[in-house]
Image (spheres, rainbow, N blue to C red):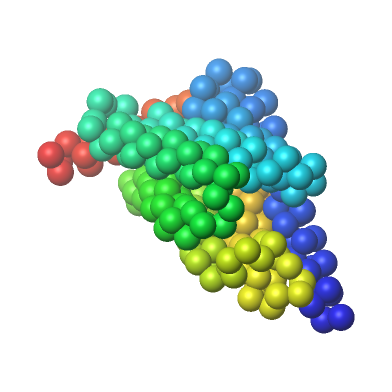
Amino acid sequence: MINEILFNIFATIFVVFIMIILIVGFFLIVRGTQTKMINIFITGTGFIGLAIGFIGNFVFHLGGLFQEIFVFIAFNFTVIFTNLTFYRRKKIYPSLVLAVTFTLGIIQLFLHTLNLFLGTNVYYLRVSLDLPYTLLTFNWLAWASYQSYKRLKVYNIAPWLKLRYKLVAFFSLIISFHSIPEFFQPKGVYWGDPENIISLMVFGITAILAASFSIGFFIAWIMPNWLKKKINKNYKPLEDKEYSEKELMQLIKKEMDEESSWND
């Protein structure tokens, strides 16, 4: 009885994650189209793809391979977003991160294909590779966002805009660890099976991490006006200048490039 209640709670949390990530994805696609910013359009497409993958697998039972195809798209689009948003000069590190992420994604697709023939025998190999795959994708975004936040602190920019990059950094770091619970998933047991307490807890932890990530990104990108006003309560601009989305990101790239040149 308790297990069933917990499963329903965790399933509801997971549904909330999917709904919010869809909202954020559509918002970013519209925003990217309006501002003609391909990086925002790309990350919005990645978020929608991620939701489609989960819906296809868990609602329409299209399988793990179907889900992994869209995870592959989402992860690589996330890295592309990071590179386009935070790096202007041609540096080797952004290209290297994208190459490694792409390679790990291809390996995951291959292992999911093998899984159709070998069953659960490749599960732990797949999970072991999923850890660096996820850590690299979202820690790269977390690091770039946090570095940008630190650089923007010296500018007279509305606090809510600075907070956006702090939130992106924090919640990207949070979601980067979501693959760790998969190591504890019992072999051959359906993910989130209410009859297996360990599997149920794995499902619950993963759902909570995913929902936290989606809520954090919702606040970062679709911040309500009342919250903006509260955050900006003591803010006094030194000049009558409002940074557009493009101007802000150009400033971020400039600052990140200068920091990178100091480290070269």
Q: Is residue 235 at least partly visible in the picture?
A: no
The residue at 54%/63% (across/down) is 182
Q: Is residue 98 above or below residue 187?
A: above
**Quarter in which the C terminus is drawn:** top left
Residue 261 quadrant: top left
The residue at 75%/49% (across/down) is 58
What residue occupies the far bottom of the structure in this picture? 2
Residue 196 quadrant: bottom right
Q: Is residue 250 at least partly visible in the picture?
A: yes
In percent of width and height, residue 137 lies at 43, 45
Q: Is residue 7 above or below residue 103?
A: below
Q: Is residue 222 above or below residue 190?
A: above
In percent of width and height, residue 143 lies at 36, 50
Q: Give the camera-side residue of 152 and 187.
A: 187
In percent of width and height, residue 43 lies at 55, 34
**Quarter in which the N terminus is drawn:** bottom right
Give the number of callouts.
0
Q: Give the camera-side residue of 204 and 103.
A: 103
The residue at 51%/22% (across/down) is 38
Q: Give the camera-side residue of 52 and 121.
A: 121
What residue occupies the far right of the structure in this picture? 1
The residue at 24%/31% (across/down) is 91
Q: Give the camera-side residue of 253 and 11.
A: 11
